[in-house]
Image: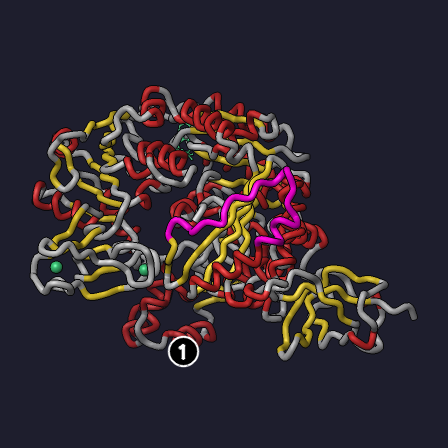
């Protein structure tokens, strides 16, 4: 028998496949790429995935071990997915085993059986619906269960009994054996009767739908460029219906924060579909179940966040990625990838359409449109009667402000509240104040682990570092001069909230930031309150800019826009423009006109001027030109090598030893910038440096890194540092 070898992806940072022998006495036809195996690896046991089967190995048979167990009879990972994962590992220069591990839910990665489970559902039989009252009076527990089930219109999961504070399972069991309650098995989300939209798509929507629907067979990337409220979701829904009608599946990806229960409900109401929702709040078992149901086709719609981009789907017919400009599609640690770019690659490989939606498209996407690589679909108007908000600048130079609230802004707030309407004030920092200082000696509260200041959180009477999470009790006296003359400088959401409470003691105020929305339902409570209507004030961070619709908000104030104009990060202005437009999109969604006021000390800033006098598209054109002149993405391709250690010396030694390697592989097509200290040198106790590689060609960048990265492991000083490579980085720190 001809010998053969299994090439296996094992979850380790070593970027290669590992060769193993098959189990003794087994035939080649027992094995296929995509099966999981258990192997002994070093001193431990690991699961891995067979990537290929080969006739040869670079190692001698005596150096090879057989696998320990073959976990799957059938491949768990399809050959298409193996191809996608291998591409991702190569493009992002990440260890292939880690990439495969990332693509499997934890339980399956650990070797669990890939078995779909179906939840039991409960409903009353007709006997159970008509139990006589006397009998129920003697059995109050049975009566409670009957009451809960009578309220349901369809079979429900046991979650409905969660409100009962006694052991309901035993009672339920009795009721089942009496024939009063019957059990059924749930499919993902059962197909049910759907509600059609009570409006016809407008012309722009119809054109977009027709264009995409006309080429469902074959790859095209579409940019669906539509202002907030222009009906993008409606376009998605109608296209999804068509793809499902062909018996295919659809993957819909969203930023975590936009994946709300309301949106999932909207999808459920409109689509006769078997939908699963995939996000970070799921348990391990829910995750692997969702994954398996997409893989088998039990589910035909996946509504998920970044990490769902690798979910297997046998009959995938279309990918939709909403809010494509959102930074959360980029994974910033471990396996650094862009879910948007992976999704595009996936669509290309499968030869299916992908729809990228945004009210503020990324410059990357707009560039691809210019290059005719993406097809541009535009929804220029808000639907229905809602009118575009007007945007104005408030010049704050030389003006008195009260905790950063200027007179014109307060005046506008007054007017709005008098009309019984609602106001959003956007502050880009949570907490009370960003600086705590001593009036006597000038001491400033600094984080001991980071090059940053501690933020005062008045509500909890704490000082917190927003970079490493360190927390301290807020001192009463100055630790240096012992005087009780500490004062807080600048304002965050808490302080603005206080100032507003003072100004408007009778108006309900809600603060929305990461501190107030920790609990599961906290955000929902605020949203419910706002939807009740009436004059209200909302103060919050950029969480407010995303996803939610606040129909009664007619005024949006942006307290401080200047920080975004002067960042060292070349993407800061793009983000600022996106934020302004997204925040503006929260105002005046119904028939009332909305107004946006932006406080600035730079009223003549060209970015602000273009954005306000023209629009986002005009801003984007200018910004793209600047990027081209400055040789920046999307015209140039970047990669960032980050190096850090608790000992700064170790980093410097490493960089010193890296230098000859950089010289050895130097090529004219790739420029090397740095090494330089990261903008925040010390963070969470680690000293950080970075090197930026830039090239006009992806190919050259790739080749350069293929030469460089293997050399790093040979550098002696590399053992004392941590490093990572970030392809197409979106944050340069
Ligand atoms: P987007 O996703 O672009 O923000 P949505 O699809 O959520 O916009 O649409 C905003 C609102 O307008 C929704 O309440 C939706 O039901 C409604 N809508 C969408 N299309 C139309 C239309 N053609 N006519 C009337 N209302 C529409
Ligand atoms: Zn002092
Ligand atoms: Zn810190």
**Residue 700, above or below 165:** above
On the image, the x and y values in percent for residue 130 come to 38, 64
Examine the rendered structure and indicate whether residue 131 appears above or below residue 661: below
The residue that disc 1 covers is 170
The structure residue drawn at horizontal position 31% and vertical position 32%, both measured from the top left corner, is: 584
- Tell me what residue is drawn at x 60 percent, y 62 percent: 715
Q: Nearer the viewer, residue 660 or 651?
A: 660
Nearest the eye: 181 or 353:
353
Assign ligand 1 to one image quadrant: top left
| Mark 1 neighbour class, 10 Å CA radius: few under 14, some 14 to 19, many 20 or more | few
Q: Which residues are magenta?
A: 659-680
Q: Is residue 150 left or right of residue 559?
A: right
- Is the residue marked 1 within 8 Å of ligand 1, measured from its CB? no
Residue in the image at 25% along x and 31% along y: 598
Secondary structure category for the residue under label 1: helix
Residue 507 visible (yes or no) = yes
**Which percent across, then down, holds residue 501?**
11, 46
Residue 680 location (% of width, % of height): 37, 52
Q: Is residue 126 left or right of residue 387?
A: right
Q: How is the image coloured?
A: secondary structure
Is 365 displayed left or right of 580 in the figure?
A: right
Callout count? 1
- For the residue pair 643 and 607, the one nearer the viewer reads as 643
Q: Is residue 250 above or below residue 136?
A: above
Q: Was residue 665 drawn as part of the magenta stretch in this picture?
A: yes
Which quarter of the figure has residue 388?
top left
Is residue 283 left or right of 355 when viewed as pictured? Answer: left
Residue 623, image quadrant: top left
Q: Which residue is rendered at x = 23% and y = 55% of the image?
A: 455
Q: Quadrant of the N terminus?
A: bottom right
Question: Looking at this view, is 626 or 581 the one in front?
Answer: 626
Q: Tell me: residue 594, above or below residue 664.
A: above
């Amino acid at each position: 028998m001809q010998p053969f070898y299994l090439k296996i992806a094992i979850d380790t940072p070593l970027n290669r496949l590992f060769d193993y022998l098959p189990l003794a006495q087994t035939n080649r036809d027992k094995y296929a790429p995509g099966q999981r195996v258990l192997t002994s690896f070093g001193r431990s046991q690991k699961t891995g995935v067979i990537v290929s089967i080969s006739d040869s190995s670079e190692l001698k048979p005596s150096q090879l071990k057989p696998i320990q167990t073959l976990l799957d009879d059938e491949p768990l990972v399809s050959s298409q997915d193996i191809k996608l994962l291998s591409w991702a590992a190569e493009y992002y220069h990440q260890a292939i085993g880690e990439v495969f591990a990332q693509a499997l839910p934890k339980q399956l990665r650990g070797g669990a059986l890939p078995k779909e489970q179906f939840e039991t559902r409960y409903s009353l039989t007709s006997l159970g619906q008509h139990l006589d009252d006397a009998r129920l009076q003697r059995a109050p527990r049975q009566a409670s269960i009957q009451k809960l089930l009578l309220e349901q219109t369809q079979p429900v999961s046991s979650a409905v009994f969660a409100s009962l504070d006694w052991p309901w399972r035993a009672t339920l069991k009795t009721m089942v054996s009496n024939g009063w309650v019957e059990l059924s098995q749930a499919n993902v989300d059962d197909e049910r009767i759907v509600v059609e939209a009570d409006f016809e798509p407008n012309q722009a929507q119809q054109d977009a739908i027709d264009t995409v629907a006309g080429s469902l067979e074959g790859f095209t990337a579409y940019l669906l460029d539509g202002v907030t409220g222009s009906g993008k979701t409606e376009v998605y829904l109608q296209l999804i219906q068509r793809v499902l009608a062909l018996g295919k599946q659809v993957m819909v990806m969203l930023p975590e924060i936009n994946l709300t229960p309301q949106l999932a409900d909207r999808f459920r109401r409109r689509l006769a579909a078997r939908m699963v929702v995939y996000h970070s709040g799921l348990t391990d078992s829910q995750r692997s179940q969702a994954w398996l149901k997409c893989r088998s086709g039990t589910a035909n719609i996946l509504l998920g966040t970044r990490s769902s981009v690798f979910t297997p789907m046998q009959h995938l017919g279309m990918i939709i990625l909403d809010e494509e400009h959102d930074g959360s599609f980029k994974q910033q640690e471990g396996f650094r990838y862009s879910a948007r770019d992976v999704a595009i690659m996936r669509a290309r490989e499968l030869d299916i359409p992908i729809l990228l939606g945004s009210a503020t498209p990324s410059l990357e996407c707009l560039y691809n449109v210019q290059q005719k690589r993406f097809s541009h679909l535009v929804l220029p108007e808000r639907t229905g009667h809602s009118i575009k908000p007007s945007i104005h600048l408030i010049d704050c130079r030389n003006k008195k402000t009260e905790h950063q609230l200027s007179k014109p802004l307060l005046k506008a707030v007054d007017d709005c509240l008098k009309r019984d309407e609602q106001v959003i004030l956007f502050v880009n920092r949570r907490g009370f104040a960003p600086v705590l200082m001593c009036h006597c000696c000038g001491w400033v509260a600094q984080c001991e682990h980071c090059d940053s200041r501690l933020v005062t959180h008045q509500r909890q009477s704490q000082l917190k570092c927003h970079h490493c999470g360190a927390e301290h009790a807020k001192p009463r006296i100055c630790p240096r001069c012992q005087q009780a003359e500490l004062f807080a400088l600048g304002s965050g959401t808490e302080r603005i909230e206080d100032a507003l409470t003072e100004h408007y003691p009778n108006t309900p105020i809600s603060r929305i930031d990461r501190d107030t929305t920790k609990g599961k339902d906290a955000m929902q409570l605020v949203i419910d309150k706002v939807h009740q209507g009436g004059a209200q004030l909302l103060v919050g961070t950029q969480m407010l800019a995303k996803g939610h619709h606040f129909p009664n908000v007619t005024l949006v104030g942006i307290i401080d826009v200047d920080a975004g104009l002067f960042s060292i990060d070349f993407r800061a202005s793009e983000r600022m423009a996106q934020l302004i437009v997204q925040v503006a999109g929260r105002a005046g969604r119904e028939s009332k006109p909305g107004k946006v006021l932006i406080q600035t000390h730079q009223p003549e800033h060209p970015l602000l001027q273009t954005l306000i006098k023209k629009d986002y598209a005009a801003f984007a054109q200018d910004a793209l030109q600047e990027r081209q002149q400055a040789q920046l993405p999307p015209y140039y391709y970047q990669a960032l090598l980050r190096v850090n250690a608790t000992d700064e010396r170790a980093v410097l030694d490493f960089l010193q030893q890296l230098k000859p390697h950089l010289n050895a592989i130097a090529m004219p097509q790739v420029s090397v910038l740095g090494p330089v200290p990261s903008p925040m040198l010390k963070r969470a106790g680690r000293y950080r440096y970075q090197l930026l590689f830039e090239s006009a060609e992806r190919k050259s960048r790739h080749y350069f890194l293929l030469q460089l990265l293997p050399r790093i492991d040979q550098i002696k000083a590399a053992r004392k540092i941590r490093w990572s490579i970030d392809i197409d980085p979106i944050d340069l720190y």
